[in-house]
Image (cartoon, rainbow, N blue to C red):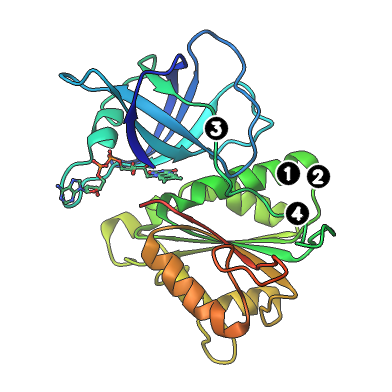
């Protein structure tokens, strides 16, 4: 989402920033008047707004919430500074802001939420496979923290691809959760393992979609879960770059999976998609 519009009444202030690299950060914002944040569903986004010099309108950009709905003190975001091929307008301003600086925000919106019911209304108990490239991880952090809060027993597998090991945001929390919770599996992968920012990386190599490609009798995903993925045992969520989404859906399509953009006649589907750009 990218839009300009009249200023909204909601004003927030930045309260926290953790830079993973100079152009990748976890940010928190809370309502400037000290109120609690409104209800939302894991997977939704907030449009953040800034007023640029010489422009009387506020410019908004969408950012997925990485905090869970149970966290009522602040919104958390996982943001990449867009620098290629030209410096991004909004993120260049955001990465130069300090704690306490203010920005506008619109109430949470979006339909990239957890599917817990099938088209016929019965509970959907299939394993959730969450596939993220880059900051596409954000909504899945919200899902996972929400599941933890409610004591969910649903099986969840998170596949996260980043260019560099240092860009595997939330890695410490995710590794700990995977060690503590038998229902949660975390499989990170790095596409530029030889770079300085990947120093010491000994895990999977390649883009996130490579975790779904058959290697010696099964994909890394299938080896981790111990069975073939099929629409009757797995429901996929994919978030990130268009290229990741296209490749993952082209791998899953021949296995019988259909997306929410191309549902079966009975309304059922097995892949839910969110594109950032
Ligand atoms: C639902 C949703 C959720 C999102 N969640 C997140 C999130 O959690 N984290 C996150 O980091 N992002 C997220 N985004 C993306 C975010 O909304 C912005 O698009 C992103 O931060 C870039 O904004 P910007 O203003 O800095 O870049 P822009 O100025 O809008 O530029 C966007 C891109 O186009 C390129 N560009 C701009 N002008 C030109 C030009 N003249 N010629 C060629 N290229 C050009 C820029 O280099 C940049 O790569 C989300 C998007 C959506 C739709």
At x 39%, y 14%, the residue is 100
Which residue corresponds to mark 4? 116
Frontmost of labels 3 and 1 is: 3
Q: Quadrant of residue 40?
A: top right
- The reply to whether discs 1 and 2 touch (Cβ–Cβ < 8 Å) is yes
Which residue corresponds to mark 3? 108
Vertical placement of residue 41 versus 164, above or below = above
Which residue corresponds to mark 1? 148
- The reply to whether discs 4 and 1 touch (Cβ–Cβ < 8 Å) is no
Q: Residues within 10 Å of mark 3 (few under 14, many from 20)?
A: many
Which residue corresponds to mark 2? 151
Q: CA distance from mark 2 to mark 4?
A: 14 Å
The first of marks 4 and 1 along the sequence is 4
Q: Residues within 10 Å of mark 2 (few under 14, many from 20)?
A: few
Left or right position of 107 against 235: left
The first of marks 3 and 4 along the sequence is 3
Vertical placement of residue 49 versus 173, above or below = above
Q: CA distance from mark 3 to mark 1?
A: 21 Å
Q: CA distance from mark 3 to mark 2?
A: 24 Å
Q: CA distance from mark 3 to mark 4?
A: 20 Å
């Amino acid at each position: 989402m990218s839009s300009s519009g009249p200023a909204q009444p909601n004003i927030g202030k930045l309260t926290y920033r953790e830079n993973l690299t100079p152009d990748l950060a976890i940010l928190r914002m809370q309502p400037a008047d000290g109120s609690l944040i409104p209800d939302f569903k894991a997977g939704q986004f907030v449009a953040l707004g800034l007023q640029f010099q010489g422009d009387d309108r506020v410019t908004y950009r969408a950012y997925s919430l990485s905090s869970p709905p149970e966290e009522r003190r602040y919104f958390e975001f996982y943001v990449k500074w867009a620098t290629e091929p030209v410096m991004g307008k909004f993120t260049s301003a955001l990465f130069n802001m300090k704690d306490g600086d203010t920005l506008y925000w619109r109430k949470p919106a979006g339909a990239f939420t957890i599917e817990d019911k099938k088209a016929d209304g019965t509970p959907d108990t299939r394993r959730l496979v969450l596939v993220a490239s880059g900051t596409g991880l954000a909504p899945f952090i919200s899902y996972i923290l929400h599941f933890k809060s409610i004591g969910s027993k649903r099986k969840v597998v998170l596949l996260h691809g980043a260019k560099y090991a240092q860009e595997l945001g939330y890695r410490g929390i995710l590794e700990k959760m995977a060690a503590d919770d038998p229902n949660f599996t975390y499989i990170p992968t790095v596409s530029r393992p030889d770079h300085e920012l990947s120093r010491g990386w000994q895990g999977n190599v390649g883009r996130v979609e490579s975790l779904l490609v058959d290697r010696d009798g099964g994909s890394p995903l299938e080896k981790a879960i111990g069975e073939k993925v099929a629409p009757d045992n797995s429901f996929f969520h994919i978030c990130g770059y268009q290229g990741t989404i296209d490749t993952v859906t082209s791998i899953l399509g021949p296995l019988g999976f259909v997306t929410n953009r191309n549902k079966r006649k009975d309304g059922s589907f097995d892949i839910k998609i969110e594109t950032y750009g």
